[in-house]
């Protein structure tokens, strides 16, 4: 969970609480706290509460739970004189903006703003790939008419903290450019926000030095860009709603023009959720009336209207974590206090136990370790390219993989085993590995199973080496099995076989084709076996 650091005196001033009651209130809001040597309160905030990544959000939540200030007061916003035309750059097509007036910045607030921005980047923003935020001194923005468009990498601007340089050089030479420069580049073009002919932001990388914040800054321009329209607008809502908590702050909407259509942001869209008192009481084991439930929702800084047992909850635009009726019940539970809720014993006491598959896996792991093998644990995802090298079929691709090395589900454990052998080819021989893991394949329908893989790599090996291990394992498990001709394409023909249990094919074993091993830079012999645990589980003695 994200850990944030706040000036303790500032938080006490905002909430009106001394440090110990403040820490107790935060604990009831699912936050762990500690006071460090620099008189900073370190707050571990639940990742589902990005609205509490800044002192204003913490103060709002704490005031509610302490009955100092309850309910949701809303955000008043009026149209500003700032507008933006968007060309919707395809690598980062969505943008939302807001203006914020009469902000009183000092060293503490600027530090908090930067922390707030980066925690939003890391969480909702997915390291800026999904959403990125720019914060500017509005009074330093060159012109009121802005443009969001692609710019050539040869265009020049002044990155924050640097001298004028080309976008290309900024992506190579600045710290932020090195980290995030590859996210949105396309065909030597990069998204940029332009004002008065000057680039003031290079989302998601870096702002221009022209609009740098300082302690004289009083008015802000917020830009949020990204690949997901919903979260781009929600992040603007979270920022605006929090800064609006500061005394005397005003909010301005920015007109965004795209394809001849215009809208104003921030949208500050609220959501309503219908909840039922009977449902909430059944979940919590309470006997609260709708009026009592509404009181607890007010302490959670939510508003609601009551109609019999039905409660219509008005969810503020900054509460992205409240999505359904169960979330409403959780807010009531937090307000009551989990320590105040008396647990009840279940009507029937049932003793838990392991599934037969779990028992089998534990037994197999003990036996394999006893036979001198080391357990391998790997991901179910693997590289499609590497699996195709082995001739594996029935691959299921991931539509939006984070890395190309993990873009498909593995239909066999051989890919994980052979990669492990390749990485350890310089280790002392023999290398004896086993893995119990999940495989997924597609052939007319999706098939998922738990498999056991066994492999040995040594300077000299033959079919009999893997056969001896498989026979020993199955006999100790009390499995009645038989061996037939066959194998897999990556095993040598004539030096491999299939394993049958109750007449059905349950696995295979043999010598791995040395030509395939060379594709993975392995120049030692390797033997391999793979068995379906689903076929074994019903046959163990």
Image (cartoon, rainbow, N blue to C red):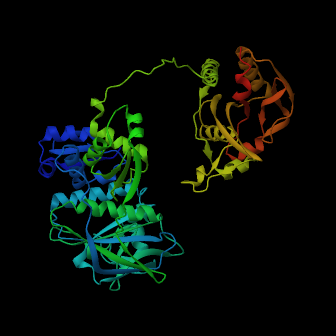
* Picture quadrant where residue 315 is located: bottom left
The correct choice, above or below, for 367 with respect to 428 in the image is: above
The correct choice, above or below, for 162 with respect to 22 in the image is: below
- What residue appears at the point 68 percent right and 49 percent down from the top-left corner? 396
The correct choice, above or below, for 384 with respect to 474 in the image is: below
Asked if one can make out residue 422 in the rendered structure from this viewpoint, the answer is yes
The correct choice, above or below, for 156 with respect to 55 in the image is: below
Instruction: State the residue in front, 350 or 116.
Output: 350
- x and y percentages locating residue 529 in the rendered image: 73, 31
Asked if one can make out residue 36 in the rendered structure from this viewpoint, the answer is no
- x and y percentages locating residue 16 in the rendered image: 12, 48
Instruction: State the residue in front, 424 or 5.
Output: 5
The quadrant in which the N terminus is found is: top left
Residue lying farthest to the front in this orientation: 308
- What residue appears at the point 22 percent right and 69 percent down from the top-left corner? 213
- x and y percentages locating residue 308 in the rendered image: 37, 46
- x and y percentages locating residue 286 in the rendered image: 34, 32
- What residue appears at the point 38 percent right and 36 percent down from the top-left corner? 281
Instruction: State the residue in front, 538 or 121.
Output: 538
Left or right: residue 448 compared with residue 37: right
> How many numbered marks appear?
0
* Picture quadrant where residue 402 is located: bottom right
Left or right: residue 171 compared with residue 61: right
The quadrant in which the C terminus is found is: top right
Left or right: residue 205 compared with residue 163: right
Instruction: State the residue in front, 198 or 282.
Output: 282
């Amino acid at each position: 969970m994200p850990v944030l650091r706040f000036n303790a005196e500032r938080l006490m001033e905002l909430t009106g609480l001394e440090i110990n009651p403040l820490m107790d209130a935060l604990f009831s809001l699912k936050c762990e706290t500690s006071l460090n040597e620099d008189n900073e309160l370190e707050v571990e905030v639940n990742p589902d509460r990005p609205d509490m990544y800044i002192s204003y959000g913490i103060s709002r939540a704490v005031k509610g739970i302490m009955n100092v200030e309850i309910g949701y007061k809303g955000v008043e916003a009026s149209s500003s004189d700032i507008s933006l035309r968007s060309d919707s750059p395809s690598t980062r097509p969505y943008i939302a903006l807001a203006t914020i007036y009469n902000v009183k910045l000092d060293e503490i607030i600027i530090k908090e703003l930067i922390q707030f921005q980066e925690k939003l980047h890391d969480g909702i923003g997915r390291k800026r790939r999904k959403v990125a935020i720019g914060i500017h001194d509005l009074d330093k923005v060159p012109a009121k008419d802005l443009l969001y468009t692609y710019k050539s990498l040869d265009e020049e601007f002044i990155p924050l903290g640097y001298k004028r340089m080309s976008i290309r050089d900024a992506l190579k030479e600045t710290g932020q450019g090195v980290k995030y420069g590859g996210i949105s580049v396309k065909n030597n073009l990069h998204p940029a926000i332009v004002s008065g002919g000057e680039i003031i932001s290079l989302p998601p990388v870096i702002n221009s030095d022209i609009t740098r914040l300082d302690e004289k800054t009083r008015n802000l321009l917020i830009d949020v860009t990204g690949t997901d329209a919903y979260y781009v607008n929600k992040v603007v809502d979270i920022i605006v709603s929090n800064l609006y908590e500061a005394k005397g702050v005003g909010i301005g909407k920015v007109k965004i023009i795209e394809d001849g259509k215009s809208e104003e942001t921030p949208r500050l869209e609220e959501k309503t959720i219908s909840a039922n008192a009977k449902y909430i009481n059944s979940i919590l084991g309470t006997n609260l009336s709708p009026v009592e439930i509404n009181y607890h929702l007010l302490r959670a800084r939510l508003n609601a209207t009551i109609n019999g047992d039905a409660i219509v909850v008005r969810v503020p635009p900054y509460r992205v974590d409240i999505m359904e009726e169960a979330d409403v019940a959780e807010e009531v539970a937090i307000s009551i206090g989990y320590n105040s809720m008396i647990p009840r014993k279940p009507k029937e006491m049932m003793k838990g136990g392991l599934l037969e598959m779990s028992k089998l896996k534990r037994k197999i792991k003990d036996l394999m370790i006893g036979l001198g093998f080391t357990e391998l644990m790997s991901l179910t995802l693997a590289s499609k390219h590497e699996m195709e090298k082995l001739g594996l079929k029935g691959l299921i691709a991931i539509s939006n993989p984070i890395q190309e090395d993990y873009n498909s589900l593995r239909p066999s454990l051989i890919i994980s085993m052979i990669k492990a052998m390749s990485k350890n080819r310089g280790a002392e021989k023999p290398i004896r590995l086993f893995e119990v893991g999940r495989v997924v394949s597609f052939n007319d329908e999706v098939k998922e199973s738990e498999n056991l893989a066994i492999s040995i790599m040594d300077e000299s090996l033959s079919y009999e080496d893997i056969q001896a291990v498989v026979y020993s394992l199955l006999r100790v498990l009390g499995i009645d099995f038989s061996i037939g001709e066959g194998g897999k394409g990556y095993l040598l023909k004539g030096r491999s076989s299939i394993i049958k249990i109750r007449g059905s094919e349950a696995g295979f074993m043999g010598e791995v084709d040395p030509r395939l091993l060379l594709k993975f830079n392995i120049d030692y012999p390797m033997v391999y076996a793979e068995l379906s645990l689903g076929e074994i589980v019903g046959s163990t003695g």
